[in-house]
């Protein structure tokens, strides 16, 4: 339907982590929320992710942390293993939601999205699938939005939470580059080995591998393939090829190879980053999450930044007299933190490719300590 009353109304483009968190936070603040998601259904890509301490701290403020803890796997340490298969370093992450609770949670993407969807809808957000925004026009203190179904909205706020290749970013006239870092990242869903009670990262002579538990019974193996051009392989070849890449690793990785070989859930994606160096907003439109700052996965904190964005956005527009002033305050508050994380992830990626793992480990720990500070 068409809407002409734009007061306290928002269109959010993208029903991912950032978009659904923003939908819940804004709806709880009294906003009338519509979410437009281009995908035709609620299926999610990828097998799992890590909710680090800042993620859990933000989710606790939305009363969602217990649901994530119940569906995921709580952890508090990252064990780094050297090229000989021996433990080289153990990072104990800050426990930001209490000393008796885990520092982070591995969770299946589908489980996290079910939790975020349910809460957004419980708070009154209306979520449309198979829909996006095709045109944007700024109008005084409103944004006129044309939807892909031909209907129009006149809203007080437009939020682009539509990922690294954001169409809203383009429609707002915000420009950034998408940089390929020379790595392809693999993930395979496997049964969780009994020894996997935290994240394990294995340094290799060429690549880097690891394991992240996401439930009592499941984990995902990851491998970062270094120095390769972006390419696409047939799905039928992925499990065999990943098994071959893992063959060079000693120690416990040998136990993971048959699990990967038997997995029917393997994905391979390019490691890409993007970060807006200027404004994230124009008029009453703003981009958040990967649309504004997409880090490489080495810091496992993309979800944390996305969740924080949604929460902080709602707070800043609530405490300022105008949406425009709230957006300025939001970007001033978020940009330095997010840009620093992206840059750290890029630096770690470069160190990995040069097999300078001993230099990467302190950066990973320092990055987590920095993110533990208030958002």
Image (cartoon, helix red, strand yellow):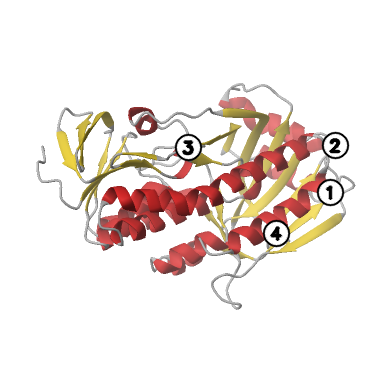
Residue 135: where, in percent of width, then height?
Answer: 25, 27
Instruction: Return the disc, 1 or 3, that comes first in the chain's sequence.
Output: 3
Residues under labels 2 and 3: Cα distance? Answer: 38 Å
Report the residue marked by disc 4. Answer: 196
Mark 1 to mark 2: distance in Å?
13 Å
Q: CA distance from mark 2 to mark 4?
A: 23 Å
Quarter holding the N terminus is: top left
The mark found on residue 205 in the picture is: 2
Instruction: Look at the image and tell me whether residue 72 can be seen.
Output: no
Element marked by disc 3? loop
**Does residue 353 appear left or right of residue 278 in this picture?**
right
Task: Say whether disc 1 or disc 2 marks the residue closer to the N-terminus.
Answer: 2
Q: Secondary structure at mark 2?
A: loop
Residue carrying label 1: 358
Contact flag, marks 4 and 3 (Cβ < 8 Å): no
Q: Residue at x 44, y 63 (%)?
A: 59
> Closest to the observer: 202 or 168?
168
User: In the picture provided, is 86 more to the left or to the right than 170?
Assistant: right
Mark 2 or mark 4, which has the lower sequence index? 4
Alpha-carbon span between mark 1 and mark 3? 33 Å
Note whether 318 is above or below 154 in the view shown. below
Q: Between tags 1 and 3, which lies in front?
A: 3
Which residue matches tag 3? Answer: 278
N-term-proximal mark, 4 vs 3: 4
Mark in front: 2 vs 4: 2
Q: Quadrant of residue 79?
A: bottom right
Q: Nearer the viewer, mark 4 or mark 1?
A: 1
Residue 157 versus residue 141: which sits nearer the camera?
141
């Amino acid at each position: 339907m068409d809407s002409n009353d734009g007061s306290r109304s928002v269109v959010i483009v993208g029903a991912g982590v950032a978009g659904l968190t923003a939908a819940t936070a804004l709806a709880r603040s009294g906003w009338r929320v519509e979410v437009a998601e281009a995908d035709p259904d609620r299926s999610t890509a990828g097998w799992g992710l890590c909710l680090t301490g800042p993620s859990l701290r933000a989710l606790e403020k939305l009363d969602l942390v217990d649901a994530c803890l119940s569906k995921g796997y709580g952890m508090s340490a990252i064990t780094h293993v050297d090229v000989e298969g021996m433990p080289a370093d153990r990072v104990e992450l800050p426990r930001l939601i209490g000393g008796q609770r885990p520092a982070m949670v591995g969770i299946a993407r589908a489980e996290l999205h079910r939790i975020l969807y349910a809460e957004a809808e419980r708070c009154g957000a209306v979520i449309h699938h198979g829909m996006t925004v095709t045109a944007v026009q700024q109008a005084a203190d409103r944004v006129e939005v044309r939807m892909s179904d031909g209907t129009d909205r006149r809203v007080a706020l437009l939020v682009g939470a539509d990922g690294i290749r954001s169409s809203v970013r383009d429609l707002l006239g915000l420009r950034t580059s998408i940089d390929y870092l020379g790595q392809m990242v693999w993930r395979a869903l496997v049964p969780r080995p009994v020894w996997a009670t935290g994240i394990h990262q294995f340094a290799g002579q060429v690549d880097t591998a690891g394991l992240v538990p996401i439930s009592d019974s499941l984990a995902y193996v990851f491998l970062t393939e270094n120095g390769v051009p972006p390419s696409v392989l047939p799905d039928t070849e992925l499990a065999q090829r990943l098994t071959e890449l893992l063959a060079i690793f000693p120690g416990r990785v040998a136990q993971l190879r048959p699990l990967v070989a038997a997995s029917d859930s393997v994905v391979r994606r390019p490691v890409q980053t993007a970060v807006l160096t200027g404004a994230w907003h124009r008029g009453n439109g703003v981009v958040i999450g990967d649309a504004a700052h997409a880090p490489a996965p080495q810091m496992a904190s993309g979800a944390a930044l996305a969740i924080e964005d949604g929460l902080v956005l709602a707070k800043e527009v609530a405490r300022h007299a105008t949406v425009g002033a709230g957006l300025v305050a939001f970007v001033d508050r978020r940009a330095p933190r997010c840009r620093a994380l992206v840059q750290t992830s890029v630096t770690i990626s470069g160190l990995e490719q040069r097999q300078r793992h001993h230099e990467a480990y302190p950066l990973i720990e320092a990055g987590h300590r920095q993110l533990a500070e208030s958002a």
